Image: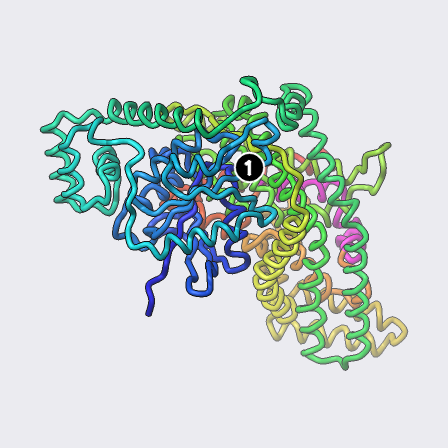
Amino acid sequence: MHPVYKIALVGNPNSGKSSLFNALTGLNQKVGNFPGVTVDKKTGTCAINENLTARIIDLPGTYSLYPKSADEQVTYEVLMNPAGLDRPDLIVVIADASNLKRNLLFCSQIMDLNVPVIIALTMNDIARQKGITIDIAGLERMMGVPVIAINPRKNKGIPQLKKSIGNLFTQQSVNRTPFIQIEEITGNWIQEIAEICKAQSTYQALHIACNYKDLSYLQAAQRIQIAASLDIHGFHKAKVQAEEVMQRYKRIGVVMKQCVAEESPVKKAVMSERLDKILLHPLYGNLVLLGVLFMIFQSIFWFASFPMSWVELLFSSTGSWLNGLLPDSFFKDLLINGVLAGISGIAVFIPQIMILFGFITLLEDSGYMARISFLTDRLMRSVGLNGRSVMPLISGMACAVPAIMAARTIQNRKERFITIMVTPLMSCSARLPVYTILIGLVIPNRNLGFFNLQGLVLMGLYLLGFVMALVVSKVMDLFVRVKEKTFFLMELPVYRMPRWKNVGITMVEKAKVFVMDAGKVIMIISVILWALATFGPPQKMHEVTNRYEAAIKQNPSQKAILTAEMNTEKLEHSYAGMMGKAFEPMIRPLGYDWKIGIALITSFAAREVFVSTMATLYSVGENNSDLTLREKMRAAHRMDGKPVYTLATGVSLLVFYVFAMQCMSTMVIVKRETRSWKYPLLQFSYMFMLAYVGAWIAYTLLS
C-alpha cells in the first residue's frame, strides 16, 4: 500500500484558502476534528495527475507562526510536529497579491521549516485595480520556491498549480537556502535544540525553544533538556522573535523593491474602499445594516409565501386522498395522523429555511459579513465582548452549534466564554418554523405602506434575542473576573460579486441537512407521540368509546359531531393527554393549554419539533385531514369556547421560544467547548427562567 501524499493549505484569513480547497477537492470533502481538540478539520482528495492522488488538508487561517488562538495553535502543531498524522509532505501557502508584503512574512516562515513549499498568489485582480504589478518569475527566483498565480473562484491557474505539485512530488529532498540565517540571531547553540527534538531546520528549533511548554508532542525528558539549554544560554524569547521579524521584513523589502511595482506611491482607491466610506460610517453604516436585516426578514415571508402554500396544499390533498382511499385501520391512522402529519408540519417551512441560508451566504460571499463585525465592535466592547464575538452571534441565526464552535477564534478566555453562553439567544433556523406558524396565527397579514406587519414582527423577534444576548453579556461581564485585555484586529476582505452557483448549492445543501437531521428526530417523535396520543389506560378508553357509541346509536344524525367529541375526549385521556394535563398547571399562567404543554416538552429535543407535535395532536384529535395545520390551530377552542391562540397566547409563545434553550445538540457542543456539564446546565437554567418570566409578562400585558 502506497503512503498517502499529504498537502496542507495555509494562509492568512480572507486570502482565498477555502476557495482553493473547494476548487481542488470539489465534492470529495469531509469535516471532522483534529485529534484531541474541537477544531474543524477539513480534508479532501484531489487527483493531481494520473500517477498522484493527494490528501488536501485545509488548516485554520493564521497570520504568522506565532499562535494566539485555538485555531492558530492547531495549525502551528500540525506544521511543527515531525511525527504527526497530518504532517504535510508539501505546503501550499496562499498569499494575497494585493497585500503581498504582509503575506510574504508568513510565506518566509513556512519556507524555513524546510518542507517543500509552493506560493499560490490570489487576489491578482484586486492587485491590478490598485495599480500593483508583480514580476512572478522574479518573485519565484528571489523566494526560491515556485510561485503560481491563481483564481480558484474561476478555476484559473489550478492546472499550473497541480503541475507544480507533481514536479515537487518527484523530488526526494528540499535543497534551498534559508530565507534568513537563524544562527546569526540566536548563536550556534540553537543546533543543540534541533538535535534534542530531531528538528528539520534551525528555524523549527527556534520555535520549539519559544513554545516548548505548549507543544503537546514533546516528551517530558525533551522539555527538561530544552529548559536547561535555554537557561545556560540566557535565551530571551521576545528579543529573538522581534529580531527575527525585523530580519525577515528587511529581506522582504528587497524582494518587494525588485519584483513589485506600483503606479503611484498612493494606492488607488478601489471600489471596496469607496464603499467602506458609507458602509462603515458610524451612522450610515448602521442604517444600512438595519435595512439589510429588514430586507432579509421581509423576504422570508414574501418570497416563501407561494411555495409554502403549494406545500401545504400538497400535504392536505394527500391526506384527504389517503383518507378516502384507505379503509379505517391502525395502519391508516398511523400513516395519516402520525407520519404524514409530522412530515407536513416541517416540510412547509423548507422554503423559508433555504431563503435564510441563501441570504447568509450572500452576506459572507460578498464580504459584507466581516464589516458587520467592525460596525458592532464598539457596542460589543460595552458589554464585555469585542467585534470577533459578532461572527458567532450572526452565525447563530443559522445554527448555534457551528456558531459556538466559531468562538474558538476569540483569543480572550472571558470573551470566548461569554460568547458561548449567549450565542443560543440568537434565533436559529430551527426557531423559524415556530415563529412563522405563530405569527401567521395571531399577527394580521397587513401592509403598513411598504412594510409587511408579519415581517416586522419576525425582525423584532430576532432583534429581541440579540438585545437580550447583550444584556446577559453585560451581567456576565460584571461577574466573570478575568483580567486579560485584547485588541480587535481583522483584515477586511474586498467586496466581491457573490458566486450565485455557490449560493444555490448552499441553499440546497442546507435544506437537505435540515430535512435529514430534523427529519430523523421528527419522524421518531411523531410516531412516538402518535402512539401516546392514540393509546391510554384501556379501561378509561373503553369507557369513553362505549359511552359515545351508545350516544351515536341513539342520535345517528349527530354522528359526525359525536365522533369528533369522542376523539377529543380520548385524546385528553390518552397517555399524551395525561402528560400534558400534569404539566398544564405550571404553564397555565402563560396562557397555554395541555396540548401546547406537550409541544413544549417534545421540542426540548429540537425546537422545530413544536410544529410537528401540534400537527400530530390536532390530526389525532380531529376528523379534518383536508385542513392545513394553521387552519386546525386557528379553529382550536378551549372548554369555555374561547380560541386557544389569542394574541396574548401567541406572543407569549413567541417570547418563550426566543429565550428558551430547547436544543440538546447545543448543550452537548457547549459541554465539549467548556469541558464541563456545569456551564450548559447553567445556560439551560438562566435561559428557561428568561423564557418563563418573559412569556408571563407578555401574556399578562396582552390579556
What residue is drawn where x is 45% and y is 42%? 147
**324 to the left or right of 84:** right
What residue is drawn where x is 87% and y is 71%? 558
Q: Is residue 690 above or below residue 611?
A: above
Residue 580's image quarter? bottom right
Residue 386 picture location, percent across and down = 49, 27
Q: Main secondary structure of the magenta part?
A: helix
Q: Is residue 615 above or below residue 84?
A: below
Q: Quadrant of the N terminus?
A: bottom left
Residue 427 picture location, percent across and down = 61, 42
Camera sees residue 420: no
Q: Quadrant of the C terminus?
A: top right
Q: Nearer the viewer, residue 610 or 484?
A: 484
Label 1: how many residues lie within 10 Å, few (<14), some (14-19) or many (20+)?
Answer: many
645 within the magenta span = yes
Q: Is residue 373 above or below residue 624?
A: above
What residue is drawn where x is 81% and y is 67%? 317
Q: Nearer the viewer, residue 548 or 177?
A: 177
Q: Nearer the viewer, residue 609 or 697?
A: 609
Camera sees residue 270: yes
**628 to the left or right of 59:** right
360 within the magenta span = no
**395 to the left or right of 457:** left
Q: Which residue is mark 1?
A: 123
Residue 413 picture location, percent across and down = 38, 33
In the rendered structure, which segment of residues is drawn in magenta? 630-659
